[in-house]
Image (tube, rainbow, N blue to C red):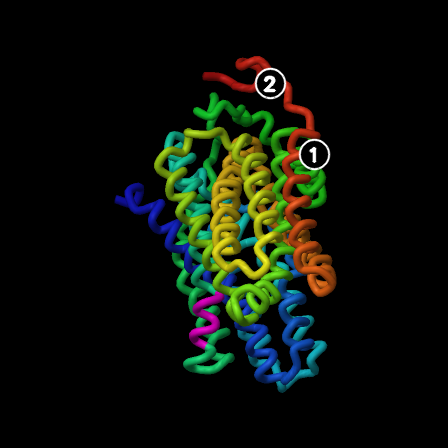
Amino acid sequence: MAERYALPRYLAGAVAARAGDEMSGPALMLAGFALAGSTADASALLAGITVSAALGGPVLGVLLDRAERPGRMLAGALLLYATGLGAVLMGLGRWPFSVTVLVAGVTGLLGPALSGGWTAQLPRVVPDARLPGANALDAMTFGVAALAGPALAGAVAEALGASASVVVSVALMALALPAAWLLPARPAEPPTGHHPCGERRLTASRRQRPSSVVGDLLAGVRIAAGRPALARATLTSVVCCVAQGMLMACVPLLGDRVLGGAGHGAVLLSCAALSALAADAVFARSPRLVSPDTLLWSGALVQAAALGLASAAQGRPVVLAVAVLVLGAGEGPQLAALFAVRHREAPERLRSQIFTTGASLKITGFALGAAAGGPLAGWSLSGALALASGTAALAALVFFAVPTAVTAPAGRDAGPG
């Protein structure tokens, strides 16, 4: 029975944790504005809890990889993240604001645990044969969270106040704690042989740990840069995130100029999330229909086309709606494909680090895109969207710029049968 319910438990925990995370950003902004009385202060809180994730990801991943029970460490990270959010809420209006922002920054170091750290545990939840379908379902949890989190933050803040929105975010993360705690332990011996998708498994002799955390960090960098399939997947996803950040900066203006109100821009994000969910649902039923490598570059081209269409949608709400629906159809399967490539290419002993470092890089790319897109959108909205389209197209070119890996003979890395 435990095996039968393992994946639903994993997915339920992932949805709760990620919805709480998606809710926390808007909730902190609302609480910061309500309690500190300044949009600048509210933005500073969001920046503090977001930007620091780029620093925490690699180290957090190494610690998860070295843990015999990574689920328990993941549960601890969730608990500390939720506690940090509560401390930020308590500090608003009571502590010096710089101290509150510092607490938000320290809390944000644990953010990658909710994305890459959780997903890295999936191969221990399901057998290899079920991994492609489970991977698509895992990607769907991000879509559900992106759809539900901000909407729930706004609804709770409207009904009960901005502070209550932060409290609900903390409660959602607390709900995920049992699912994290019960994640399977690391196997005593690594699996040998070949994965159905074709990747090579490490033998016990190759699984020897470096002697230090720094050694593991360096090993992870070598793997990420040295395996072309992994490197191009990472680079493609990060460049796409830059484009998505540019779009995020344009959303309020799109809502104001095309939909009749800046607040209506959130509807666009909901449409994209719904489209991503629908596309992921299709690929979850036929996960081997298209190879993940193909989905990575084709998803970038779909996003480029959608952003180009959005740049030409001035005054035409229907065209803009079609554009964001197409955008989601490119984003959702691309995320599932990224996870599939990481699972395929990352060694068991470095998997969490590869996932959390990748999450950190994507967060950084998104932040850079938003920072660049904001001023440009104020000067020319269509120009900012056109640049976002070009950036997404560049992501596809980046994919092909990295040379394809040379596959070793089947028996070289297989180990004893």
Quadrant of the rendering where the N terminus is positioned: top left
Residue neighbourhood size for the residue with mark 1, other residues' Cα within 10 Å, grouped as few (<14), some (14–19), many (≥20): some
Relative to 79, does residue 306 appear above or below in the rendering? above
> What range is drawn magenta here?
150-156
Q: Position of residue 411 (x, y in %)?
A: 54, 13
**According to the image, label 1 marks what residue?**
225
Magenta region's main secondary structure? Answer: helix
Q: Is residue 172 magenta?
A: no
Relative to 274, does residue 185 appear above or below in the rendering? above
Tell me, for residue 30, which label it has, or none. Answer: none
> Which residue ends up furthest to the front in the rendered image?
315
The amino acid type of the residue labelled 2 equals Thr
Kindly identify the residue that appears in the image at 60 percent across and 52 percent down: 312
Relative to 34, does residue 18 appear above or below in the rendering? above
Q: Is residue 153 magenta?
A: yes
Residue neighbourhood size for the residue with mark 2, other residues' Cα within 10 Å, grouped as few (<14), some (14–19), many (≥20): few
**According to the image, label 2 marks what residue?**
407
Sequence-wise, the earlier of marks 1 and 2 is 1
Depth check, front residue: 319 or 206:
319
Tell me if residue 59 can be seen.
Answer: no
Task: Tell me the SS state at disc 1.
Answer: helix
How far is the residue under mark 1 from the one under mark 2? 16 Å
Q: Position of residue 134 (x, y in %)?
A: 40, 40
Q: Position of residue 29 (x, y in %)?
A: 58, 73
Quarter of the rendering containing residue 261: bottom right
The amino acid type of the residue labelled 1 equals Ala
Depth check, front residue: 222 or 266:
266
> Which residue ends up furthest to the left in the rendered image?
1
Quadrant of the rendering where the C terminus is positioned: top left
Task: Tell me the SS state at disc 2.
Answer: loop
Q: Position of residue 408 (x, y in %)?
A: 60, 16
